[in-house]
Amino acid sequence: MTHLSPAPPESAALPSLTIVPYSNPQARRLTQALHLEQLATYGFADDPDDTPEEQFHPPRGLFVIAHRKGVSVGCGGVRLLDANTAEIKRMYVAAAARGQGLGRHILEHLEHHAASCGASRILLETGARNHAALALYQRCGYVPVPSYAPGRNPDVNRAMHKDLPQEHACPPTRDAGATR
C-alpha cells in the first residue's frame, strides 16, 4: 500500500488516502457497499467484480481508500481511457462519513493523478437520483454530456465531463504526491 503524504495543518480533519489494489479487501468492502446502495436505489447496478483490477494499476490508473481513525470510509478510482481522457470510477463515501468534504477530497486526488498522467479531459457517470454526487461534481466543474457508455438509460445514469488544464481548476486540498 502507498500512503499519500500527510495533510497540511489546515486540512487536519480530512482523512488519509491510501493507494491500494482494486482487489484490496477494504476496497472490495466499499465497492460492494456502493453496489448494494445502487441496487436499493435503482433495482440494478453494475457489479464491481466485473471491473478488471488492472484498469486501476498505476500509472494508467489508481484506486484510493480514505481512512478516518483507522476505518475505511470512502474510495474511488481513475483510469485512463486513452492518452487524453480519464474516467472516474467507483466513487463512494460511507453514509456515516458523508457531508464532510470527503467526496471532494477523493475526487481532487483522482483528478490530480489523471492530469499528472497527461489527461486533458475526465469523464464520470453517476446515478440520476444521486443528488449529492451530482451537486459535488457540478461544484467541481463537471458538466453533463451524452452517455459515453453503450446501453445506458439517461433516466437512470448521468454522464459528466470536465476539462483538466495543466493547472486543473479543482486543486487538491492536500499534497497529492505519494510516499512509500
Image: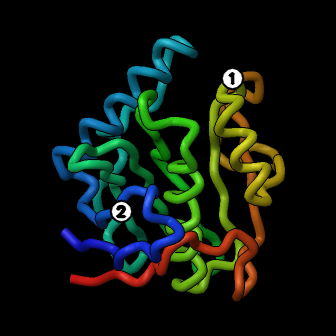
Read off the residue under disc 1: 129
Q: Position of residue 56 (x, y in %)?
A: 36, 63
Q: CA separation, marks 2 and 1?
A: 27 Å
Q: Residue at x 18, y 68 (%)?
A: 1
Given the image, on which type of amino acid does mark 1 rest? Arg
On the rendered structure, is 175 left or right of 168? left
Against 26, residue 80 (above or below) is below
Mark 2, secondary structure of its residue: strand
Given the image, on which type of amino acid does mark 2 rest? Leu
Read off the residue under disc 2: 17
Quadrant including the C terminus: bottom left
| Sequence-wise first label, 2 or 1 | 2
- Characterize the local packing of mark 2: few (<14), some (14-19) or many (20 or more) Cα atoms within 10 angstroms: many
Mark 1, secondary structure of its residue: loop
On the rendered structure, is 136 left or right of 82? right
Q: Residue at x 77, y 56 (%)?
A: 142
Quarter residue 5 falls in: bottom left
